[in-house]
Image (spheres, helix red, strand yellow):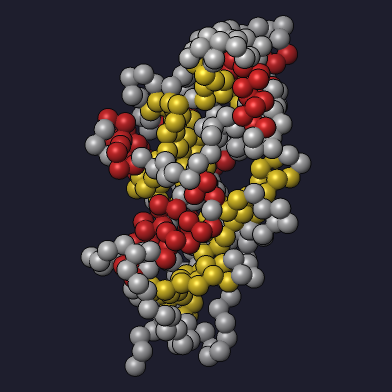
Amino acid sequence: MFINGSILYHSKAIQRNLERFDATATIDLNRFALHLWGRNRYYQFTAQFLRKENGKNKYTIHLPEDPRGFVGWLPYFNKRWDIATDKLPFKEYCLANGLACPAFSASKTDTLPGFLIKRRRSSFGVGIRGPFRKFDSSNAAHLLREGEYYDQFISGKVGKAWYWNDKLVCCEMRRMSEIAGDGVHTIRHFIEAHLGKYGFTPEWEDFVDTLEFHGSSLDHVPGDGQCVVADFRFGSMLMSPDWKNHNVVRELRESELGNQLLKAGPVFWRGIPEEIRQSTLYTVDFVVDEEHRAWFLEMNCNPQVHPDIYPDILEDLLGSPKNIPVGAPTPPAQVSSPPIHQYPGQGAQLLPFNQPPTLGQPGSAFNQAYVFPPKP
C-alpha cells in the first residue's frame, strides 16, 4: 500500500514506460509538475499531495509543510461531475443503468436489514455511522442529519476499481478488517497496540458500531484464533501497511467479478459530461458479497493515482506503445521547437516565438496539450 503514495514508485512507473512511447519527461521541483514530450506532443501533468488539516485528510496541489503522501500526476486538474460528488445521484444512475447498488433511502430504513448512515458529499469514509442491525427511533445516532441518507450494509470484501475512460485499469480488494483473538487480550488492546505502532491514537467511535453489529465489543476477549470484524472501510486504520503491489486487475479479468467490473466501465464513463469525458481517471468503490456479486457504492472524480495506470494514460495521450520491453533506456530530451498550444477538441494556435505556453489555471477541467511541429 505504501507504493501508492510514494513519488518514487510513481516516477519509476512513468520512467520505465517512456521509451515504449518515444517519450521523455522531466519534473519541475517548483510545483512538482511533470513535463512529458513524445511523438510531437507535450503534456504538463499536475501533482497532488496528501495533507492533514484539523485531523482530516485532504488533497492539495501545493507541497505542504507536513506532507503525508503523494497522490499522483494527471494531465489535468479538478474535473468534477454530479454522480462523482453526490452519492445519491450516483445510486440513481446505477439503478437506471442496470448496475447493482445497495438499497438506500433519504427518509426511512423500513426495508433495510442492516444499515449505515452516510453523508451525501464526503470523502475518505468521513461521517459514516453504523452499521446498525435495526432502526431505533429513540437512538439519536440512528436519526438522519442534514445531507445524510440510509444505506444498506452488505458484508463481504471491499474493493476499489480504477478506470481510465471506460477501461478498467487497476483494482484492489481486501477483506473487511478483522481482529484475531488470542484468548487473553481484549479487542481494545489489539486496536490500541496496532495503531500505537504507527503513532496513531484510536478514534473508538470508528469501531464500536461495527463490533456491536458483529456481536462483539471493545472489551470482548475473542478466543484463540477467533476473528471478529472491527471495521468495514476500504481504507481502515487497522490494515497493516506494506510495500506490496495489491493490484489484482490481471487476476480478475477472467473471473465473474472481473466481468462485472469490465462491463460497468462504459456505463460509468457515460455518466461523465461529454465536454470533460475524454482522458479522465476515476474510481468506483464496491463490496463483493458471498455470491461474487459487486455492489457499487460511490464514484470518486479525484482519486489517488495508482502507479500501475500510467501506461494506459500514456497510450491514450500518445498512441500505441512500441513492442519493446518495459524499462528500456530512454534517450535525453531533444526539445527546441516553439510549441503549438492545443486543447483537445480545439484548433491549434501557433504561439509567438519564445513565448512560453500558458497552462490552464487551477480549476481548469481540460488536458494541457501542446503539439510540436515536425523538424524541417
Name the residue at 45% across, 84% down: 335
Q: Give residue 174's position: percent from left, percent from top.
A: 44, 31
**Viewer-proximal residue among 248 and 189:** 189
Quarter holding the C terminus? bottom left
Q: Quadrant of residue 210?
A: top right
Vertical placement of residue 170 versus 295, above or below = below
Name the residue at 37% across, 74% down: 330
Residue 53 falls left or right of residue 255: right
Asked if residue 320 shows in the view, the reply is: no
Q: Quadrant of residue 315?
A: bottom left
Residue 151 falls left or right of residue 270: right
Q: Give residue 4's position: percent from left, percent from top.
A: 50, 48
Residue 129 falls left or right of residue 310: right
Asked if residue 155 shows in the view, the reply is: yes
Residue 241 falls left or right of residue 245: right
Name the residue at 60% across, 37% down: 124
Vertical placement of residue 309 versus 22, above or below = above
Q: Give residue 140's position: percent from left, percent from top.
A: 73, 13
Count how many numbered circles sit on residues in the image: 0
**Viewer-proximal residue among 233 and 201:** 201
**Viewer-proximal residue among 4 and 335:** 4
Q: Give residue 251's position: percent from left, percent from top.
A: 29, 38
Name the residue at 30% across, 43% down: 250
Q: Most extreme residue toward the bottom, as rendered?
A: 376
Vertical placement of residue 134 versus 11, above or below = above
Vertical placement of residue 353 versus 63, above or below = below
Q: Most extreme residue toward the right, as rendered?
A: 54
